Image (spheres, coloured by chain):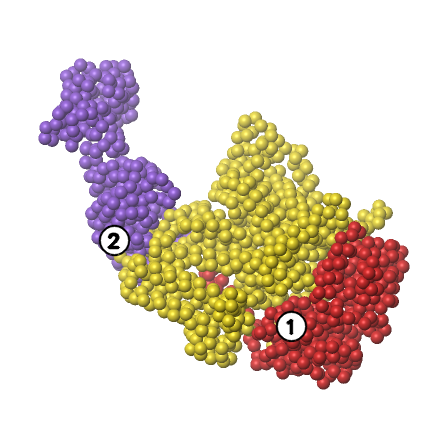
Chain colours: A yellow, B red, C purple
Amino acid sequence: MRFRETRWPIEPVAVLWMAVGWLGFAVLPWYGIEDGFFGFSWLFDGYPSDSEFAPALVLALKGEKLWLAPLGLLLVVPLLLWGRTKSDPVFSRLLIIVSAAGFGWLLFQGFAIGLRGWQFGWLTSLFGELGDRQFGMGYGALLVSGAFLFLFTLGVAARGAVSGDVFVVGSIGFVVAMVAIFIFMPILMMLANAMQTDDGGYSPVAFLAKLFSSRLWSLACLAGGSRCGVAWNSLLLAVLVGLLTMFLGLVFALVVTRTGFRHGKLLRALTVLPIITPAFVIGLAIILLFGLSGAVTQSVAGAFGLQPTRWVYGLPGLLIAQVLAFTPIAFLVLMGVVEGVSPSMEEASQTLRASRWQTFWTVSLPLMRPGLANAFLLGFIESMADFGNPLVLSGNYDVLSTEIFFAIVGAQNDAALAAILALVLLAFTLGAFYAQRFWIGRRSYTTVTGKGDAGVHPRLPAGLTYALYVIAGLWTAFTVLVYTVIFYGSFVKLWGVDQSLTLEHYRKAFSVGWNEFGIHWSGSAWSSFWTTMEITLISAPLTAGIGLLTAYLLVRQNFRGKNAFEFATMLSFAIPGTVIGVSYIIAFNVPPIELTGTGIILVLSFIFRNMPVGVRAGVASMSQIDRSLDESSLTLGANSWQTFRRVILPLLRSAMLAALVYSFVRAMTAISAVIFLVSARYDLSTSYIVGRVENNEYGIAIAYSTVLIVVMLMVIGLMQLLVGSRNIGRRGIQQGDGGWSVRTNVSLPGTAGGPTTIAGAG
Amino acid sequence: MIKRAILGAGILAAGMWAASSSASAESLTMYCGVDEVWCQQTARAFEEKTGITVNMTRKSAGEIYAQLRAEAANPKADIWWGGTGDPHLQASEEGLTVEYKSPLLNQLQPWAIKQAETSGYRTVGIYSGALGFGYNKDLLAKNNLPEPKCWADLIKPEYKGHIQVANPNSSGTAYNMLATIVQLFGEDKGFEYMKALHKNVNQYTKSGSAPIKAAGLGETTIGIVFIHDAVSQVVAGFPIVPVTPCEGTGYEIGSESIIKGARNLEAAKKFYDWALEADVQSMAQKAGSFQVPSNKAAKTSDKAPDLSTIKLIDYDFKKYGSSEERKRLLKKWDEEVASLPQ
Amino acid sequence: MAEIRSNAASVTFDHVTKTYPGASMPAVDDISLAIEAGKLVTLLGPSGCGKTTTLRMIAGLEMPSSGRILIGGKDVTRLPATDRDVSMVFQSYALFPHMTVMENVSYGLRFSGHDKKEAASRAHAGLELVGLTGLEARLPSELSGGQQQRVAVARALVLEPQVLLFDEPLSNLDAKLRRHVREEIREIQTKLGLTVVYVTHDQEEALAVSDRIIVMNKAVIAQDGTPRELYDAPANAFVADFIGEANILDCEVVSVEGDEAAVRLGSLALKLPARGQLVGPAKLAVRPSRIEIGPAGRPRTIAGRLEKVTYVGSHLELIIGTPHGQVFAISHNIDAPFQAGDSVGIGFPERGPVLIKA
């Protein structure tokens, strides 16, 4: 018998959210506090009467900012539900109307009244000058909007949506609101910004002129002119990188799985390196090797009596650096796919009298097609979004990502141009994303269950094997060479000038001293290092959490608009980091949401950029957990939140680990988005390193990167310990098999089966 | 268990965050327009000296100017320190900054005082940097090239493929060079010069100081930059020789201004004066900045050229700093120079 | 020690229809039924007949598209599973693999307002009831299939639900164990007086354990009755064929008088209970074991020819060609000298054929 019959005169969940709303409205400061989200000096600084820190209620009582008052009234209305049960139609209708009105009003006043009074011309002409202004929203607004959101979902749940499950409807509402605010709103505001002219008006003509300018689209290089448009440059580079990484990835995957190669683990370890290396460090090593004064260029020129050239600057150098950086991703994707091809298919082919060669061409390779497309897409998107390598290597071969950056920070200071360039970039990646989805369609030849059928993959034909060995061997040697340069470079006094060995760079960056307060982090890198650890360690669990929650909704719940929901949550995967950075600056620099210069904006950008991986990892592992487990938990009296927490999450350890590790690594190595978002107080390692590279302090840059690589390896190991594992036996839920190799069953949107890994530096 | 651990980590991190952001009584919010290291050094030094907490944000001068305009109704910063003079002047014209006559004014170089006078004492020069170029002496010798001494040398055909300069569209340094050339030779001849130079340029970089860094690494022979950037390379140990062009050259005046509506006006004034002191300005070289300080008594590196020995043109900051002129020149450069084959 | 008791309640379906989103046909079509408290009722039918959907609607895992569901007289139609006082034993047992036996069994108790100590004591009582004392600390993966099954039962029982649901609970067990476990389930059910709804597709299992069987076919109830009723008096050809095996033969009702109908099967005239049939074409359902095989030409028989004789140990299986189609029969006289090709006469004992609708 269940003792849950205690009757509340009013639904407790509604009471909870009303209380939260009132806490936000009447107790906490409504507006953002200047010294940061976690600064608490306001408590002693004139709160609650000082208008700057006052709660909305106090403001209203003082007769200030009266447009906030209706929110408080709306927060009282749900008390009318006294004595009504959840199943009463009045209950849901009232809640939905009140909370929608509240949320809508909150948004409207936020956007309509800004730093300089009315934000829209028509409001000024309607009401005249406001004579007042408001800043970005703070704790109070946050809680009130949360309260309205969850009162709304409670109302919707009470109407019977998703079997009336409050937790599930609330979660859907939460994820949708988050995605809308932190993905769609910035992109839309960027679009609006792209149409803006210098004087603040909107002009489609100026927009079109910029959009179709010859800087972007010129084809002069084909006709013998000096150079082609930036858009074509980016496209050509991305396609080449996509093809080459796909090819090399396939070669490595075949070597490891199909040739009896015995050092596969070693090879895997080697391929992880580029994933956890800040991207531009590879570019730097390429310069040190192949630049005009590079070791290789000089020795080759010396040996053949040639004049050394700057050949590496531009397409060739970019190609080398990006292929080096992104091949591992293709490799990891294709490993899963190549292993996933059922051996019995190949055995069947052989028993049908096909030779090894014919089997490979007619069965194995076609079965890998979805994986190949995935690998290509990843290479393509990564190349498009890559910022670090073009920064050091592009020469006169301009690409979109750096153009965007310099449109904002350079002398032009043209945010509209940056927005337009970002839109072109977004169009390319979304186009590729769709083309891939369209081409693959529902074609998926591999199984997600991970159940291998008995059978052994046949060896490849001998000739092919040797060819693969040669290609893989050469490329591996090259990778090793590059990393030797990186490692060695961190100990060289001044590369190219003074080759004597020194620990100076490490000392400069990471020296630690003692003073009267204890440890004194005197090295120049510590500040950005600790900020980076803080931001990444905060964002990684949040990313994993929201990713797994979304996965749970996608796999376990049925609701209307689920497809659109899935698409929206996966969209940010196809948005290059540069675009996220630009759009965040545009969207969150001014009220109502003022986040630039804070650490929160970095955390948010990491969460929403890396969320798709958490989602895919969660979807893949959750599909392996029998649905009856949740149902039995429900019939045993647990609600869906308790079920999620006690049954599903514990069983998702491997997915959780993958999502954690991945979002951690991504956040540690990300540069393209954060370069726009860092501030003096919240500087990150990667942007600090870029700064050092810009200052020619290569030694420190490389030393710092080396330290980062080591730290990442350690943290990943630690996470594995933390998430831990408990033998859960034969139900077939695979525990993380050395999760730090970032091998997860993460599949790209639209390729339901293809286990893929998404990784790398963006 | 896991949850608890994550929660713990989160609390710990939040704690660190809160600890790092706890504010003391008096504070100063500074927008800093120079190199990160220099900004940090200056902020920390002021904190040590006065006990006033400095909240510093580093941005380019143009960005700071744009931000001041956006925040005019609700200024968030107190002082704007560093960055090229043009935007400081623009801000003073628009009344975004406050008039303040520092008692230290009489210790300053004439060009710094002139900057203050032009603005009606709403800004003042704190350092100055002259435009020039630098070359890698090893590479020059290897390629048997003569030593370049003047702007005119750089367009000689033997330097083809040896010169790097930033793109004036993205770099203030390169725009300063364009404006300098136009003022030096007149607009028509100036553009002829740029066209001839274009043939010798191996790469237009994005950032202003990148050319001399490439020269330091041996990736180009000559880089056109501010001379103090070339000096940094020399100090760092690279085989660079800075050159001040014989025809004369343009320059920038790094400035500081107090923002109108500053919440901590007293602290801002304190900082303003402090930053003009000789020993404070002498610290710049420790941060790897080799601009010429505005205080006559301030010391700079012996490797930095003495500004008084450089032939400076009478740079018209008002005209060439205006956005119409800037747009016009850049457009012309794009159309007439950048589009030419190299 | 706590004792497991029963809170048995009735279950009522009032014109319940369930159509899955996107499906053109309902999975359950306008079903009304009443299950008395304290009875074991089986939902039986081929796969896809709607029996599992019906069960899940009792559990609250599916919501009906229309109609009302009452448990213990209370309308629970819109109540989600969490809030219903119903427990379920799943086909796969759905034991939480990361929890021990003890944690699994006390899982639901923790959500029902019991404190830790009481939950533990109840869980012990539950485990004792199914004979698993001493295995509390094991993980599910360390148990045999039968033990896992019992844990699942204990986990559901300890909540003392109004209704206990079983979804094909025996299908993962081997044949010998199956017989044993189903008897245990029946024993516990009768001992505690639980209301149990039991889904299976195995008619033998259904006949063995049930107080009542509800046969479902194509989303509707085909027949509802005691095992004996279903076997001896199937309502239609589907039930006749699904419960045990039956020969379905075409016949003609010549006249009906009261409860008795005169039926003609070829040359044979039979008097049978009318069971509501009217004059006209009808069908006869005859159990293979209720067919008498003798020498050809006896009176009141129809003629046939043995086509196949199979010896299966306990009995003989015979396939006989007749003018009315093939007939399948069983003879327990394993020493009878039947051989394929023999001509035989087929007779029907009085309680043999059942008249059903054409």
Image side of residue A251 versus residue A650, left or right: right
Q: Where is residue A673 in the image (x, y as percent from the top left)?
A: 60, 59
- What kind of residue is marked 2? Asp
Marked residue chain, label 1: B
Q: In this view, does A101 lie above or below C72?
A: below
Q: Which of C301 and A375 is in front in this view?
A: A375
Marked residue chain, label 2: C
Residue for point 23% across, 37% down: C223
Residue for point 69% across, 78% down: B122
Residue for point 65% across, 67% down: B63
Q: Position of residue A193 (x, y in %)?
A: 59, 60
Q: In this view, does A690 lie above or below C41?
A: below
Q: Is mark 1 on a helix, strand or loop?
A: strand
Q: How far apart are marks 2 and 1 (CA)?
A: 68 Å
Image side of residue C3 versus residue A195, left or right: left
Picture quarter containing residue A203? bottom right
Which label sits on residue C75?
Answer: 2
Which residue is disc 1 drawn over? B31
Q: Where is residue B105 in the image (x, y as percent from the top left)?
A: 74, 82
Picture quarter containing residue B276? bottom right
Mark 2 neighbour density, 10 Å: few (under 14) some (14–19) many (20 or more) = few
Q: Residue furthest left?
A: C258
Check whether the beta carbons of the residues at disc 2 and disc 1 lie within 8 A of each other: no
Mark 1 neighbour density, 10 Å: few (under 14) some (14–19) many (20 or more) = many
